[in-house]
């Protein structure tokens, strides 16, 4: 079964992926980007065949240019890597300013 992990921004997702040892596929407009734990060169989504996509540990999907981002991890993702990524996501969410803090900055 797949698991979704949410990040508030594109930068937070990319930082967490790098910090936890994941490789992120090349971007292609609004298509998903493949992720694999380890050092890999992952092609654009449109250039991956069905077998390539099946072998990925997950996919990175963003809304809008700067996020938010949803990472879907597949069952074949190493459990230690998934745990580290979950922890990094929780830290990224906790580091986000609240709505009240954002309003205070504007005023």
Image (spheres, rainbow, N blue to C red):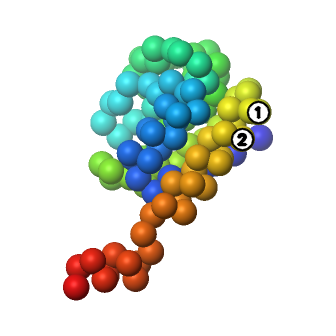
Q: Secondary structure at mark 1?
A: helix
Report which quarter residue 53 is drawn in: top right
* Label 1: how many Cα within 10 Å (few below 14, some 14–19, many 20+): few
Report which quarter residue 38 is drawn in: top right
On-image quarter of the N terminus: top right
* Label 2: how many Cα within 10 Å (few below 14, some 14–19, many 20+): few
Camera-side residue of 44 and 17: 17
**Residue 90 coordinates in the image, percent (x, y):** 60, 55
Residue found at x 40% / y 36%: 31
Residue found at x 31% / y 83%: 104
Residue 98 can be seen, yes or no: yes
**Residue 51 coordinates in the image, percent (x, y):** 61, 15
Report which quarter residue 54 is drawn in: top right
Number of numbered discs overlaid on the protein picture: 2
Residue 35 can be seen, yes or no: no
Residue annotated with mark 2: 83
Q: Secondary structure at mark 2?
A: helix
Camera-side residue of 24 and 32: 24
Residue annotated with mark 1: 79
Task: Give residue 64's mark.
Answer: none
**Residue 30 coordinates in the image, percent (x, y):** 35, 40
On-image quarter of the C terminus: bottom left
Rendered view: 95 above or below 87:
below
Query: Distance of mark 1 from mark 2, alpha carbons?
Result: 6 Å
Residue found at x 38% / y 25%: 26
In the image, is 92 to the left or to the right of 56? left
**Residue 41 coordinates in the image, percent (x, y):** 46, 14
Rendered view: 2 above or below 106:
above
Camera-side residue of 83 and 70: 83
Cβ atoms under marks 1 and 2 closer than 8 Å:
yes
In the image, is 102 to the left or to the right of 8? left
Residue found at x 71% / y 41%: 83
């Amino acid at each position: 079964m797949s698991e979704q992990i949410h990040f508030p921004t594109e930068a937070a997702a990319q930082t967490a992926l790098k910090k936890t040892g994941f490789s992120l596929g090349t971007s292609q407009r609004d298509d998903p980007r493949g992720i694999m734990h380890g050092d890999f060169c992952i092609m654009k989504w449109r250039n991956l065949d069905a077998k390539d996509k099946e072998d990925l540990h997950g996919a990175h999907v963003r809304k809008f240019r700067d996020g938010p981002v949803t990472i879907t991890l597949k069952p074949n993702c190493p459990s230690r890597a998934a745990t580290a990524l979950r922890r990094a996501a929780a830290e990224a969410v906790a580091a986000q300013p609240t709505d009240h803090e954002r309003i205070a900055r504007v005023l």
